[in-house]
Amino acid sequence: VFAISPGHWTDGIAAFGARLKERWLDWRVSRAEKREARDRQRAKERKEQEQAAAAAAAEAAKLEKELKKAEEVRRRQEQENERERLREEMRQRAEAPIPRVYDPEEGADEESEPILAEDDSQPDTESEPELDEDGQVVIPFEVTEEVIEEEKRFQAEKVREYRYKPPPVSLLNNPPDDEYHVTTEDMESISRMLETTLADFNVDARVVHVNPGPVITRYDLEPAAGVKVNRIVTLADDLALALRAERIRIIAPVPGKAAVGVEIPNKVRNTVYMKTIVNSEAFVNAKSPLALAFGKTSSGESYVADLRSMPHLLIAGQTGAGKSVCVNSIICSILLRANPTEVQFVMIDPKMIELSDYKRIARHFLAWMPGLEGEVITDPKDAVTVLEACEREMDRRYRYLSETGFRNIQEFNEAFEEGEIVTMSDGVPAKKMVYLVIIVDELADLMMTAGKDIEFSIARLAQKARAVGMHLVVATQRPSVDVLTGMIKANFPARIAFAVRQKVDSRTIIDAMGADKLLGKGDMLYLATSTPEPLRIHNNFISGKEIRRIIDHIRRQSVDFDKFCLPGEAPGNKTFAMEAAERDDLFMEAAEHVIRSKQGSISVLQRRLRIGHSRASRLIDELELAGVVGPFDGSKAREVLVDESWLDQNAQGGQDAAPF
């Protein structure tokens, strides 16, 4: 039995080894399959957990947003209730009866205006007090200097207690509830596309932060070590092509960050409603009566600026970019906060349609000047006149500040409120200085018709008017160097650039490129005095119906205050009229040539008098100041305003004749 040949032993061992190896391979395959199944199960569970966590986080964020919104509504309601309570207290205090007194030497004339006395005046206790027809106690007294002084203080107090109810925020349109918001998936997808596109051009950079906004979303890129920022800037068109974007703007670098910003338009543009900005904490907590609601930044934050700190604002952009809406939002921002005894406007509108609605509140907010027909100035000649009147008002205010020893309008008004200032040195009763906001809607048209006069007045006001509470807001749709001259730009550090077609126009407005990359319809770059780089803001929108609702509310208010009036035209026909002794020696000869030829032209004087261009230009200016020719009218010759009789009247006096 045991006698088995060696060959049989070898075959048996080989068969056993083959079976063992086959079982070992089957075990390995089974083990790998089990491991893969276990990994798939774990991945599935992990994904479900992440989805559940994301859903919980989204629900928590939504709940937190609703709680914040409810808290904001409650806070605004409390603020409104507090304002209503204060108004009611002021109304009750104002309607409280005030004792009336009379002067026994003048008799009790019922038609005469009663003089108001202190509330704590007591009647004579020895006899029965005398009552007037209203049941008020009549107390005899002597008219003294103290009584007159008290009357002046009362009149000042009357101005301070003028009851004016500003337009409520409810007059503005509510933003829709279904506004579009950039989703997390969209931001992640665009971030990957940005990184991939840059990698295709051998630029190593990664997205480190995303700032979603109402119109654009900014993606902050962090370049790898050794990557030049300029390489990313030069790929702007390639990135726009890869992202299928209308146009993108690259900020290299982002101020205050070690990153390059890429601003990409959203799929859906949200309209920024003015009510949203007016209800924001930045606008509600602003203390200035000249707080301006500008809109939202690229990161979605409400932006509010103070016109007092600018102190003047230049706005430019092509037609349809949002310039007129911006001007209206600036005006309405002030109307929603300010009192007519605090702020007044001077409005110049050569186009005659943009600011015409505000004529209806002329009694409340528009400054008046003797001799001008309309409160909203539409004639370029009247624009020159009213700007010169603003210069005289500025000089008058500086004279008052010098007399009282104060440095600015805030210090003067605080002293007036405390009763420290009653009369000025010239005997004029002291009044509170109101802020004067001068709106010029279309500068280009004025520069074409009255260039030098307009430029000189605007430059002089911009240089000096800040301390006395006078501020300029100048807008134009033609940002060329002949409109935005160096003298004007030098005195307007705060500027707004809306969309323009060319890079050179952007440089003309804000001294930097970028406005040519804007999207229009309120998309703007704001260059503030405190920041070296312009800030991208989407301007808030206000409709014509909202403006009319605000105006209708103001019209229903009383006008129980002294109307602000600009000083009239100074003696001598012009504020800066030239004295006869300062005239050129050829003045009368030039006047004769101009009057006889009926051509007020510099070239005519050059040919007839054989003089240079500069001297001929000065002679034309002198003739204008003397009333011989009219103002500059573009390429046309100046209009001759007098006939040859003027020469006969001034022939005897020669060059010493008085101005016409």
Image: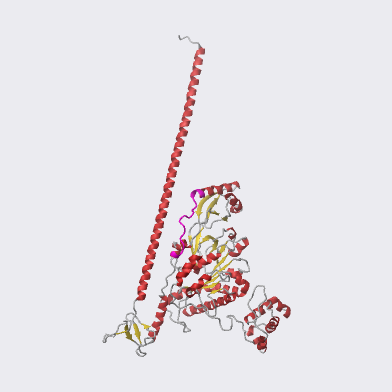
53 or 257, which is in the foreground?
53
What is the magenta segment's predominant secondary structure?
loop
Q: Position of residue 357 (x, y in %)?
A: 51, 70
586 or 647, which is in the foreground?
647
Task: State the residue at coordinates (56%, 82%).
Answer: 570
Task: State the residue at coordinates (49%, 26%).
Answer: 25
Quarter placement of the C terminus: bottom right
Quarter placement of the N terminus: top left
226 or 252, which is in the foreground?
252
66 or 307, which is in the foreground?
66
Q: Position of residue 169 (x, y in %)?
A: 44, 65
Q: Is residue 181 magenta?
A: yes
Q: Position of residue 142 (x, y in %)?
A: 35, 88
Q: Is residue 238 magenta?
A: no
- The color scheme shown is secondary structure
Q: Residue 376 sits in which quadrant?
A: bottom right
Bounds of the magenta segment: 170-186
Q: Is residue 3 left or right of residue 319?
A: left
Residue 532, visible in the rendered structure: no
Q: For the view shown, which residue lies furthest in the left direction?
A: 126
Q: Is residue 196 left or right of residue 424?
A: right
Q: Is residue 154 left or right of residue 578?
A: left
Q: Position of residue 434 (x, y in %)?
A: 47, 74
Residue 139, visible in the rendered structure: yes
